[in-house]
Amino acid sequence: MFGRGTANLFNELPALNGLDAATARRMLSTAYLDIVAARTAGERRSGPEREQVSDYLRRLASAVESYAVFDSLHGMETRDGAAFVAAEALALVAETTTLPDPTDVDPMEIGHRIVERTALLVEASLLYLIAGFEPNGATLLSQELGALPAAARQNADLEYMDWALTGLVALSRLDVQADGVAAPAEPSELLQLNLASGVRAALLQRLGAAVFHYLGWLRGDSDDGAGRARAELSSVTRAIAAQKADQHADIFHLARMADAAVAATSPRAVRGIPAPNEDSEAHYRAYLLGRARGTARTRGRPVLWPAARAYVVGCLPGPHSHAVVSVPTGAGKSFLAEIAVSQGLATGWALYLVPTNALANQVRHDLERAFESLDGTQVRAFLGGDEYTTLSEEHAAQVPVGTAVVMTPEKCALALRLAPEAFSNCRVCVFDECHLLADGTRGVLAELVVSHILTLAQDCRFLLMSAMMSNPEDIKAWIKSASGSAAVVIRRPWRPTRTMRGVVGVDGPQAEEAGQAAWTSLVHPARPRRGRPRRRMPFDAAHVVVANLQGPWSQTEDVEYALVRLPTSTQLAVRRADTGQAQLDRSGWINGTSAALTAYLATRGFSVLAFLPSNPHHCFSVAREVALPDELVAIRPQHELVSALMTIAEDELGVASALRELLDRRLSVHTAALLDAEKIASEVAFQSGMSLAMFATGTLAQGLNLPASVVVIGGTAVGDRREANTPEGRRRTRSQLLNALGRAGRAGFANHGLALVVTDQPMFFQLPPDTQAARQEAAFLVEEDDSTVVDSRLQTFVEAVLGGRLDIDTASAEELVALSYLPFEPIGEISAEHILRRSYALHRRELTRDEDAARAAAELVRVGQEYVERVAAPEWITTVAYKTGLPFLLCLRVNQALERVRPNVARRPSTVGGWRSLFFKKMALLPPQRAREVLGKEVKSSQIEVLWNPNIAGDNPQWVPPPTWVAAWEALERIVSLYMDGEPLAVLARTLFAIPPDAPVDSERTSGARPIPRTIRFVNKLLERLSRLAGALVAIDEVAPIAPAGEALPPPIDASLSYLPLALRYGCTSRDELAWFRFGLRFRRPAHILARMFPVPHEVIEDAEVQSWVRQQRASWLRQHDPELPADPGEDPSLAAARAVLTSRA
Amino acid sequence: MAGCETLEDLLGEALTTLEHELTVQITEVASHVVTTIGGLEADSAVCAFATYALVAGIGQAVRMNLAIAAEMLGGGPQFADALRRDVEQIIGRSNAITNDFREDQRDPWFTECLGHLLLNLSRSVGGLGPPGPVQALTLVHTDVRDHGMDLVGLHLEQALLALNVAEAKASENHASNHSGATARLFAEVDAGTRDKEIRGKVQVLREALPAERQALVSPAFWHGQRAYVAVISYGQVSTFAPTKRRPTYAALAVGADRVRLLAVPLSDYRQFFDTLADRVRALVPVVAALVGGS
């Protein structure tokens, strides 16, 4: 249950006879397992008796709390480890307490029990604060605390304690928005009635005042609140201690704890972050206090978590140093990045790189909200792919000071090529999930992007962050050496949640017995059977969970594992083999077990994230098998945003969404076979509790904030089994599975999480369980989350270049990316040599770095020139390749095809549709080998399957395509036109897959062969690839304008070609549709409707002007509709839904 | 009493008297250790106990609270007024009180005082307390209906600090039931229900320890050594048999040697407490005068 960070805290425990760190971890884990067992009606079958565990926990809690808080006789220094262990132990003890049943006892008794229980929870929460785990304190106190009955309020002591606890609860939650309420009575008046009660009231009043002084200080109400709070608390404890007044021991105890909590948290107050420079002090302070307070839309962040604190200490103000941050999921990377960005905005702009567009969108929204109180800032996200376009709003052509720009490395690569000058003023570059550098597919480009920025932006400070990276020191050394600036490593394994790792197997003895009985009834049926004898007999195999009681499964001793029997089971079968022998039929083990566990745990109140990494379509089929109880489904909360998104999704699909039925049953699904609107609907439903479980593919684990209290990993094979045993396949598998494990535990909801791995083959566990076999089956369980070595993917390329082995004709995909990215000729002052010199790959060759960079660049020029000469390419084709990032030879072939089309073009097209037509004509002439490079994986459609016919091959630029080939490209153009014209996907599917007009379009997603998943893949994959190639058309047009001989070039206002790449990708036919999609709302069909309703005026020409016009028009459209009034019945439902989505995100 | 100039003198004199007057008889049974206390009804013992009850049971708490009130609020009532009011609230203005008050408030409170006294005396008289010298002890409750444990103390056992918890009960004719109630409270301590309260009490008791003993507090929580002391006053003619094996005590986790029953049989149960109350009331002006009030 304890990762490296928390496990180490146990090593700080005091030296007490018989207390050792390993046993303490084991006992705490066992206690958690007992709680899980109780909640699931399961039964722990190994390890110490529950009473023993409970006794150990209690002694541990009291002893280490005493050590952490009360043994510090000289001041209030705390001992983090002891406080953490005490908090964990007390919290687990507190989890077994419940609110009193109001029908059981008298109101006074209820009052006492409520106060005692709240005080216990406050005690544990304050310990978490002292230990630096304040999110856990808030989580612990997020449960129902109960209210004092009116009759109990007649007791002045009880009422006063209840009042003081309200303040302490606010302190424990660090709820800076809480305002103090008046004390129940004046202590001096009480004093006249009862001396002791009056004194208690006076002590509690001072304690309560101290709490609100401190909370007020955190939110900026005063500058001396923390000092005053400590002075007040000290006066309380001093007065009681001086008199040894044990009558008020409870107050003494709480006041000492509160004082220790204030002492521990105040140095981490957000308000203490230094301003980036003197000029910005006032408005930066306003931002910090705004963030500390939070708003209705953002959570208050009054104190820094450890990684952010380390960043502030090590890198601010400025930032003056680079930082490489390796912290677990959920450790506060986002806020750390926000602080870095906020600092950089004072003197320049900030770049925020994220791995996906979905994350870019999420980060954009988060930053917009965060910077509401930071005057003069602007947040922009450049979404989409890396298709080349000259539209100014698609890349960072000019970035004003105070702007935060969010995008993927691919989009950034484009921006670096298009407008490198914009980066000179980039002050901060955040690279989230920077282990992408080691990705087999995207790593080369990511490294080149970082190297390029290091080259262009001398004053830029990097913040590279990952939860997976095992070698941050290497990355630090690279950045430091490449930039010549200081760099720090922040490696804090701190995490606000703990995850217990378990393997799900079957109860060996039970399964043996059940299997034997099934075999007996198969071979000796009770009743004779007509016809062929049965060959298969099912039986239920009960589930057991074997969990490690330390953390990762690195121990081999039996004592470090516990076995819990669950009340769930999977149906296995015995089969009569051809030899007549019994054979176990394990089919359905992974999915059946995943479905059964997910359904059961969701029913028992856990939020369950089930990863099914082997096949994305299993998510739908397994979700289908899950039936939550009717009573849970009946109380499904409604969510307006989910409804609106599903309306948009179904309008886009043109058929009912298979997701809707699942959402209605309180289940979410997240796979690549979903539209964006469906993905967001699924996420929102799960985050809001509308869905109790989510089924997802392994890729979900990247970045999105969807933690759960239980993670079920259904199978340990990830993706394509053919790649499973390649180094890259193993790296990806381990990375995805570890990332999935990290999703268990949910700050604010559950401090502890459970990750259950369903192995590919069922394991038959006995006592003691064979954990060695489990470790072999799921080797990643042994590793810590941050086990990914981030190495250089560019290195192979560099070595090939330096070794004279680079051959453009046979270059790998990674080499082609590098070749396209690095300019053969200097662009401005930047050459390939500059970029390479700052690369991670060359950093590895430190001694010869500069020399190697020069040699590599020269070799690249030589190879490039030789190649250009050999293939007789125009020199400018290298520029096209550089701009588009496309392989050189592909650009050449595109241009050669274009040359063949050019004589047949009557005049230069002036509409998007015209350029599309020209594009497809050119595509039909592209040699088959290059065409397939563009098309990628085959689309199984009779209309276009000939495009993947291996019998049509070759790379001859002058080839004469057969009629079937030309017809296929024409068919593809028709289908693409439907998409660009705004037809629903079902219409595309009908054409793509020749579905008869009278037959319905199957809306199922349970298999990748179904029409809707195939169409979504077609749109997402094929159109993306075509749009990148359309970018080549744009780039060629820039250097060698496309027009019939003698025709005058159109005036500059004709930007129709520049729209083509995005129009293809996003499904738009006109500038207006595209404008509404890009700047209005990123839903295709509503964008088409709005473009018809609100066409962009002709006089609005420049891309920035178009953006501004659409945004104003959108605001005006949203204002026209008063949400209080009934909806217009004549309005298109998708438009109403789009409005609801926009409004909800405003 | 004559010649006493301070409360400490008065208390010292009372303790000396009681140390001489009280008799102790120890009996070990399977489930617990019984100490039967005699001699308490002697007139000098009643007087001395009344002094102890007023000074250690009420006066000490009043002085302590007044000192805190002065620091927190800048002042409070006069000591004499506060003492008189607390005495009246705890034992009544006279013996003309209801049976409920007598049985649920006054007599149990005196028994709690008695428990405090006996644990104090245990430093010099064997068999009156836990298996080791008491180092610190909480004060007597001024509200006997308080939900908390009656007394919490720390004692030394083989150089380690250990916890002792005392629970006092008074019943002329139903002491057996009340011994069951003490066992229930001790079982709550075993089960951890009282942990929070114990943590709080012990951390204040720590303040009364010398520095070298304070360092033993955290380890005391860890090794969890503890003893239970039941103090039961009852009518001598009742059927209560303190030396009978008690399954509820036997079920406690600490072992028979650590469950102590201080049995206080009274030949004239009602008269003893009435006389005691009268003596306490009569002592109020004396004590007030010693402190400086009127």
Image: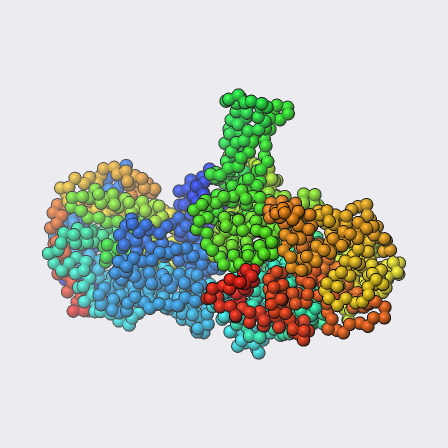
Q: Is residue B125 left or right of residue A1025?
A: left
Image height check: is A105 above or below A845? Answer: above
Image height check: is A278 above or below A930? Answer: below
Q: Position of residue A556 (x, y in %)?
A: 56, 40
Q: Is residue A1031 left or right of residue A615?
A: right
Image height check: is A585 above or below A1028? Answer: above
Image height check: is B124 above or below A1116? Answer: above
Colouring rule applied to residues: rainbow
Q: Is residue A845 left or right of residue B8?
A: right
Q: Position of residue B156 (x, y in %)?
A: 34, 50
Q: Position of residue A962 (x, y in %)?
A: 83, 50
In this rendering, does residue A360 appear at all?
no
Q: Residue at x 58, y 37 (%)?
A: A588
> Along the line of sight, which residue is nearer the eye, A1 or B265?
A1
> Along the line of sight, which residue is nearer the eye, A471 or A435?
A435
Q: Residue at x 38, y 47 (%)?
A: B224
Q: Position of residue A1087 (x, y in %)?
A: 61, 63
Q: Residue at x 59, y 51 (%)?
A: A655
In this rendering, does residue A1044 appear at all?
yes
> Along the line of sight, which residue is nearer the eye, A109 or A549?
A109
> Along the line of sight, which residue is nearer the eye, A84 or A1057?
A1057
- From this viewpoint, which residue is outermost toward the bottom? A279
Number of numbered discs visible in the structure rendering: 0
Q: Residue at x 25, y 56 (%)?
A: B141
Name the image quarter holding residue A680: bottom right
